[in-house]
Amino acid sequence: MSTTTTKRAATGSLLGLALGDALGFPTEFNDVPSILAKCGPWRDMELPRPAIVTDDTQMTLALGRGLRTAMERGVLGPKRLERPVREEFVDWFRSPENNRAPGRTCLVACDLLRAEDRPWQDASQIHSKGCGANMRVAPIGLAPGLSDDQRAGAAQLQAALTHGHPTALAASDLTAHAVRLLAQGAEPTGLVGLLRSYAYDNRTRYHEQWLGDLWTRSQDPSPEHFIARGWDECLEILGRLRDALRDPSPETDPCLATGAGWIAEEALATGLLCFLLFVGEPVTALRRAACSSGDSDSIACLAGAFAGAHHGPDAWPAEWADRIEYRGDLMALGALWDA
C-alpha cells in the first residue's frame, strides 16, 4: 500500500483547501491590523459559523467532478477532459450558489464557454494570470494513475479554460506538481528545490496536444517563447520564496515576502510559504495564511491543500471538518482518489 493511500492524502488535501478557504473568506480584502481587530490574535483564529467557502472551493469541486467523469470514460486526454470540465464550469457559472465574489476572469470566460460551438481557446482570457487558475487545480495533483505528461497537460488545460496567460498555466502546473509530491511523501524541506528543477526542466515545453493554438492569441513569436514567460515569472517568485524561508519571520504578514496572491505565481508562493513556515502545525499554517493582507482565502486554501496532502485528514480538527460547507462532496472525491 502506498503512503498516499494509507495517509488519505486526497481527503486531507481537499478538506484543508476548503477549511483554508472558509477561514480566509471573512478576512479577504482586509489589512492585517483590521483582521487582528476583528478576529483577535491570529494564532487563535476560529473557523467561522457557519463555515462557508468561496468560489475557490466551488471551482475545485467543479474541476474534481469533471476530472472524475473524464477518467471514468477512459484514458485521460485533452478532449476527454475538456468536455466535462467545461460543462462543470458552465454549471458553476449558472448556479445560484455562485454568489461568493468570484473573479471577473472566471465569470467572463465561463460565460463565453457556454457557446458549445466556440473553441475553448476563444473563451480563454489570454492576458489574465489571476489565482483562479491554480486555486482550483489540486484535484489534478491528487487523482491517481496519471502520467507526468497527463498531469502537466491537464493542469495547464484546466487553467487555460479561463486564464490563458502563460504564468497562470505554469503556476497551475507547479501547484498540481507540489500537491502530488507531498501526497507521495516528498520531504517539505526539499520541496522548493524540486519545484525549481521542475520549472527549469519544463521552461520551453509547450503542451500543444493539450493547449492547441492557444499561444497564437498572445503577442509571442513562438509557443516556446509564450510558455517560457510563465515559467520565468514562477522561477522568480520561487527564488523569493527560497529567500523568505532562509530567514523565516512567522509573525510577519506573509504577503510582504512573496506577494499578495491575487495573481497565480504569488498565490502559489505565499500559500507554500505559510505551509512551509509551519510544516508541523497545519492549523497554524491556515491561520497565518488567513491573517494576511492579500487574497487571504486563496492563499489559505492553497496552504491547506499542501498541508493536507502532506499530513492527511488527521491534520484538521474534527470539529472543523465536520461542519465545513460541501463536506459530503469533498469527502466523496477524497475517498475515490484515496482508494
Image (cartoon, rainbow, N blue to C red):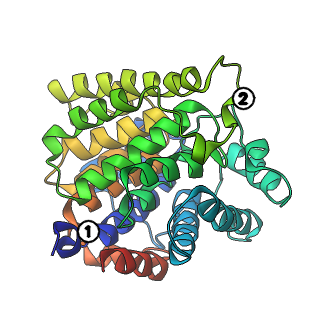
Is residue 25 visible to us here?
Answer: yes
Residue 191 percent across, percent down from the top left:
21, 40
- Above or below residue 216? Residue 264 is below
- Above or below residue 80? Residue 211 is above
Marks 2 and 1 sit apart, C-alpha to C-alpha, by 44 Å
Q: Is residue 168 left or right of residue 117?
A: left
Q: Which residue is mark 1?
A: 316
Residue at screen point 29% across, 36% down: 195
Q: Is residue 14 left or right of residue 102?
A: left
Residue 136 percent across, percent down from the top left:
51, 55
- Above or below residue 119? Residue 233 is above
Mark 1: few/some/many CA within 10 Å (<14, 14-19, 20+): many
Residue at screen point 57% across, 65% down: 58
Give me the disc on residue 232: none
- Amino acid beneath label 2: Thr
Mark 2: few/some/many CA within 10 Å (<14, 14-19, 20+): some
Mark 2 or mark 1, whichever is nearer to me = 2
Q: Quadrant of residue 73?
A: bottom right
In what element is the residue under mark 2? helix
Residue 149 percent across, percent down from the top left:
42, 49
Q: Which residue is mark 2?
A: 216
- Amino acid beneath label 1: Trp
Q: Is residue 188 left or right of residue 320?
A: left
Q: Is residue 88 left or right of residue 242?
A: right
Is residue 135 visible to us here?
Answer: no
Q: Quadrant of residue 13?
A: bottom left
In what element is the residue under mark 1? loop
Instruction: Point out the image quarter for the C terminus.
Output: bottom left
Residue at screen point 25% across, 59% down: 183
Residue at far top of view? 221
Residue at screen point 77% across, 67% down: 94
